[in-house]
Image: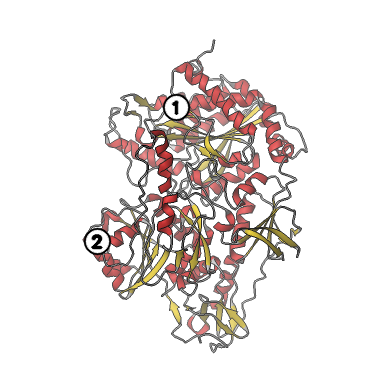
Amino acid sequence: MFKNLFVILGVFSFSFGQIQSPSEFLGYELGDSFTRHHKVVEYYQQLATADPDRVVLEKYGETNEGRPLYLVFLGSKDIISNREAIRENHLKSLVGESTNDHSIVWLSYNVHGNESVSTEASMKTAFELLTAKRDYLENTLVIIDPCINPDGRDRYVNWYNQTKNNRIQPDPNSAEHFEPWHSGRTNHYVFDLNRDWVWMTQVESQARLPQYQKWQPQIHVDFHEQGVDQPYYFAPAAEPLHEVISDFQKQFQDEIGRNHAKYFDANGWLYFTKERFDLLYPSYGDTYPTYHGAIGMTYEQGGSGRAGLAIRNSDGNLLTLKDRIAHHFTTGISTVEMAYKNGKRLQKEMANFVQEGLDDPKTYVLSGNADNLKALTQLLEKHQITYGRGKGSLVSGYDYRTQTQKRIKTDENSLIIPAGQVKNKLIHVLLEPNTKLNDSITYDITAWSLPFAYDVNALLSTKKVPYSMTESGRTLNTIPKDAYAYVMDYQGFASQKALAALLDRGMTVRTSYSDFRVDGASFHAGSSILLAAENTNLENTLAQISEEFEVEFKGVSTGFVDSGKDFGSPSVTKTNAVKVALFKGEGISSYNFGEWWYFLENDLNYPVTVLNTEYLGYYDLDNYDVLIMPDGNYRNFDDHTLSTIEKWVSNGGKLIAQSGALGALSRQGSFHIKSKERDRSSSDPLLPYELQEREGIKNYITGAIFKTKVDTSHPVAYGYDSDYYGLKLNSNAYELLPSGNLVSFEENTTPLAGFAGSNTLKPLSESLFIGAENHGRGNVVYFTDNLVFRGFWYGAKRFVANAIFFDF
């Protein structure tokens, strides 16, 4: 009764008019070789040139390495010529101001560079839609992003072409099936772009998301690959599913899955659904569209970076690139088919999703550090979330930090975020105090609440709160002339970015290690002081820094303070432009290296020397002031290497070590860091096999938020309150240090948000989160967890910058 879609569609290798198939244009059959990014772009340019009535190619950005990012628009002549009117009509229909008869489908390929089949499949899919399945384009606009991550993909393709055998070698032990450190999966800064949809830290995301916001498709598919032994995965998704996901979204995922299944069944292909890939963490390519009302889905083909052109999996079956193309091609066409057949339904249900939140009276009221609030508003603006400022009204609601009902009065500094707007569901997902889990076995972190991430106070009211759209902007002072000195108060991470810029520009900066008051103005510990006598062109430089970072410099007439320490005190010391080195390479987490690299070069905009662990014996560490050891196992660091690092610290260096690096320092024996014994309570030996996975999660923390206590007098903790709400990503626990426990977990601690297995909590009780100690003439800072995780936990960035620049 049902015919084989792939077999039927596969016969169309002819030219349609002047349009060439991928194989005709490239000069080889798809699947015989990997296509580099510039050739992929050229193929789509050929389509747009040959058939401009139905194909439009738009460049939307460039990667860090200068590769272009494109969107391809496919539709009938009528749709393409009227696509702007269709877009506007679609957005108006979501809020009930118009009607729309067109479907919009967005297909995203190769967000992970070494999951390299999907870009190849994108070309085959585009050609098919323009030829054999051109009827689908009569009522459907298809948007194709052929390669979200061309830097990573070309890294993989270039490496594979350099490594592969002349003849296809499917032996899984062959070198071409083992990528080197820093695989092609990630982008230039080693970030996973499929975790960056919300945070938008990377240039690829920053370019792509405005385009996505502009179109708001009803269906979005993110094409991926998984291990070579895995059958194909497609919707419906696994639990946990966030509670904002509608019944229709769940139902339509099932319908799409069944449509895929009939094609896979006809071809005899294996697949699975409803397992492993959930819909919870909001920054994925499936969840982010879902929280906008779309049908957001991940499709996973077996293969990834190990597969190459062909590989034998553990079952002895041969998996080829052509097989992988066929599978992604089939689900892509099947997805467009479902949009073509269900256009009015999709539009109606997406509008329902949006409109049911427009009258939501709930309001989020945020207050706290002005720099943190400003950074948060910048993120809200990127997602087109409306916010305002308080108007002096009394508000009652749930207080995030005390977890009790509280009553406050708003003011012009209060940040008011009304839930009753187009992004209603996304707002709740991002700002809710604690995500509800209907299953604790999940694919990613389980807590990300923005008030905690940005270290600000939050109150959730069930009622509407009056607000003004007038932004509470800072009025920056004019830099006065002829001052004795200029002082920048330490008010947040922006202050540390400004400090980095001052040092990088050769200015002489002194830091006060105590609060002080001078000329009637008060300043916090950590404030920067620039003496006029020690700097040239000072006023112009400070004016530039003030404008760039929105910080103020107060001119003062004397160094004789009213309270605190005078400017010549031993407590006011020169802050040097430190030379920072960062380890990378085997034995180190490539993700965490990338997070540190990005933090230093982009967040802090400060120079860093990257040291490859492969050449440890060649480096003279005395050339550097600060050495950063990211997370890793450091198995290749022998006793001599660790002793060299210890001697460097003893001679005056500052070492910043994170997570797994602490184990290496503990192994060395001269440092005080020591892990706590884990609770290894034995499980029931008669526990049924099917329950063992669920029993095992008692030993894991999947990204949970904990309250910690802060020693605010320590320089690394300047700028913080006595309570800090940190993201705990692993289950490791560390003993308190003899001294220097500047951030620690409370006794009998439990998470405020997210999942932490029961066996992890006892060791965390009264354990170390951030520590610092003197070691000889140098210092060591211990980060027991990842403070630069994915670049989005803004509230932690002051700790990191303080650790780099401040003495103790």
- As drawn, 537 above or below 801: below
Task: Classify mark 1: residues with Cα within 10 Å, few (<14), some (14-19) or many (20+).
Answer: many
The residue under label 2 is: 641
Q: Position of residue 491 (x, y in %)?
A: 57, 70
Q: Secondary structure at mark 2?
A: helix
Q: CA distance from mark 1 to mark 2?
A: 47 Å
Task: Classify mark 2: residues with Cα within 10 Å, few (<14), some (14-19) or many (20+).
Answer: some
- As drawn, 282 above or below 506: above
Q: Position of residue 212 (x, y in %)?
A: 61, 41
The quarter of the picture where the C terminus appears is bottom left
Q: Secondary structure at mark 1?
A: helix
The quarter of the picture where the N terminus appears is top right
Q: Depth check: give the residue in front, 518 or 238.
A: 238
- As drawn, 783 above or below 61: below
The residue under label 1 is: 325
The numbered dot on residue 144 is none
Residue 793 appears anywhere in the view = yes
Q: Are marks 1 and 2 in contact (CB under 8 Å)?
A: no
